[in-house]
Image: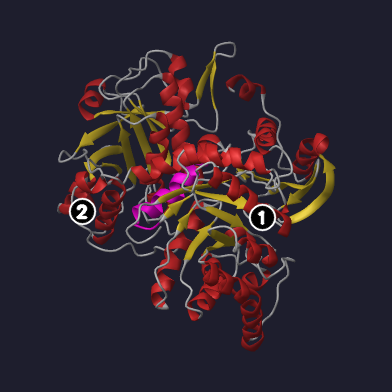
Amino acid sequence: MGSDYPIRVQSMTTIDTMDTEGSIAQCIRMIESGCELIRITAPSVKEAQNLENIKKGLRALGYETPLVADIHFTPNAAELAARIVEKVRINPGNYVDKKRFETIEYTDDSYAAELDRIRERFLPLVKICKEYGTAMRIGTNHGSLSDRILSRYGDTPLGMVESALEFLRICHEEKYDQIVISMKSSNPQVMVQAYRLLVYRLEQENLPAYPLHLGVTEAGEGEDGRIKSAMGIGTLLEDGLGDTVRVSLTEDPEFEAPVAKALIDRYSHRAEKALPIALVQAPPHPFQYLRRATTEVSNWGGAQVPRIIADFSRTPITDMTQLKSIGHFYLPALDKWSMNDLGADYVYTGDTPAAFMLPNGLREIMDADAWAHENRPDTAYPLYHFPALPASHTTLSFLKISAETLQSADLSSLSKLSGVVLCMYTSNEHAYPAFRAAFMALQVQGITLPVVIMGDYPTASESDFQLFASTDIGGLLIDGWGDGLWLSMGDQTADHQKMINSTGFGILQAARTRMTKTEYISCPSCGRTLFDLQETTAKIRKRTDHLKGVKIGIMGCIVNGPGEMADADYGYVGMGKDKIALYRGQEVVKRSVHTDQAVDALIDLIKEDGKWNEPSVVESQMM
């Protein structure tokens, strides 16, 4: 991998490593799904030893796919595995250090002594890897930074980068360069910032441009897992970073490779189709989130959360039930409207207005000509198409304009507008950098109008739609650009409208710009997992998915426990057979809870903190 080689797809087994035949069978399913590297956990020496049996079994069947030993806490297992498999992954947060959640005061001398201790413990593995020709991944995880790093650099992307650099410098001094690096987090924003900062620091220190392993750790399941993964991984691929990809889903590992491959394959012929982009200035803050300063227009821009526009231009709104797909529900028995947390803010109806009065929580956008004909200034808002400009007397209007126009045109006419929201689209196959260049042009010319980012994917499948929209638009939100989303695809059936709407809100949630639902930080399972993660995640989601903004970590074992769910409000962590530890933040509050009672105990904990509310009757009807 690396250099001019293709971007490689990889995943990780979920079978107990001591189950040789089961591991071999699962490896084969993963290979057949497109996996080019396979990672297997080796939490102790006995599992590291059994890697040889798994490898021999695969080779005897004609499978030559490289194997990677996943190591946490146990250098002796790493040193053994490095003699057997093609690659060893270590976590610098726990390879030498034991996490006790302590804040430690260091002088320069005492910190230097700690680095000497790391070198002494790490050097034997480096020498073995050199002798056996074994590659190594130095894999930093946001949630498992050592107390030493946290005490000196904080819980930051800088701390993640420094954690890896401490080990990389030793490798460089020893002239060992068969290294891959990762900077994983369950928060795509933190993950993107860390990788960008890592590349910058490698160049600053004249260290080699080591290959990068991309992944959003503990992304979760289903739609949310795919959106978070695409946002983090896709944004970095758009930056030209990444040499191998692992999509971490709380699903069987053979379902991960196709998602990774879909993200990668998008770039196979991109250069042939992309239009040239005139970048007037580099993005000013690639290592931190800073929202673009905009003028507040009605409920757009300024301090407002990003808004969602649902496109009904090809399917006229004639029946109240059509709005159910975008989170607005007419309840005949009560003769009133209700809205769930995924209720769209606006509908675009083109030249055919809705046939009835919309609910209070939903506003209508119409083409300017139709709007003028209908004469509904208080209940609908006009959409103009550049170079036509909105009339100055309207309190809120929308202007559709291409990213290419914003990149190249004199924007002085826009600077004189008030009460206007820009709706930006692009025909460039390379959408993300086209949008990014347009935002930079707006910044250079001092235009502070709010911007809706439009993404239209007329030929994409549902799966590709979610991945591509999360990449093209999610990456912009991570950098602080965008005040709303307007997504569409070829079909406007109710099912597609619901999926499009849910994807839009999922993108905003993953970018941490608008929290509208419970967030689940769940690991993808591995041979260390102590319970059925998929079943348990589904059970917890069923009981808690109405808790807006609450973050719940569901971890298979202590390795992915309090550290990896660093962002979570509550944690559900395996600690032994049929035994669960419950966490409030990173503090364990209950130990050895039997799995039969653990979900109820988790809910009791949430209630104790005053963060629980019962689903209403109306909510139950809307589910």
User: Who's the residue at 31% across and 48% down the image?
Assistant: 432
Q: How is the image coloured?
A: secondary structure
First to last magenta residue range: 224-242
Which is more toward the observer, 72 or 143? 72
Q: Residue furthest bottom?
A: 109
User: Who's the residue at 40% across and 77% down the image?
Assistant: 204
Q: For the image shown, how many numbered marks are present on the structure?
A: 2
Image quarter in which the N terminus is found: bottom left
Residue identifier under label 1: 42
Q: Is residue 239 magenta?
A: yes
Q: Secondary structure at mark 2?
A: loop
Q: CA distance from mark 1 to mark 2?
A: 47 Å
Where in the figure is residue 495, as x and y percent of width and height? Answer: 44, 21
User: Who's the residue at 65% across and 63% down the image?
Assistant: 80
Residue identifier under label 2: 277
Quarter of image, res 518: top right
Q: Vertical placement of 160 versus 219: above or below?
A: below
Q: Classify mark 1: residues with Cα within 10 Å, few (<14), some (14-19) or many (20+).
A: many
Give amino acid for label 2. Answer: Ile
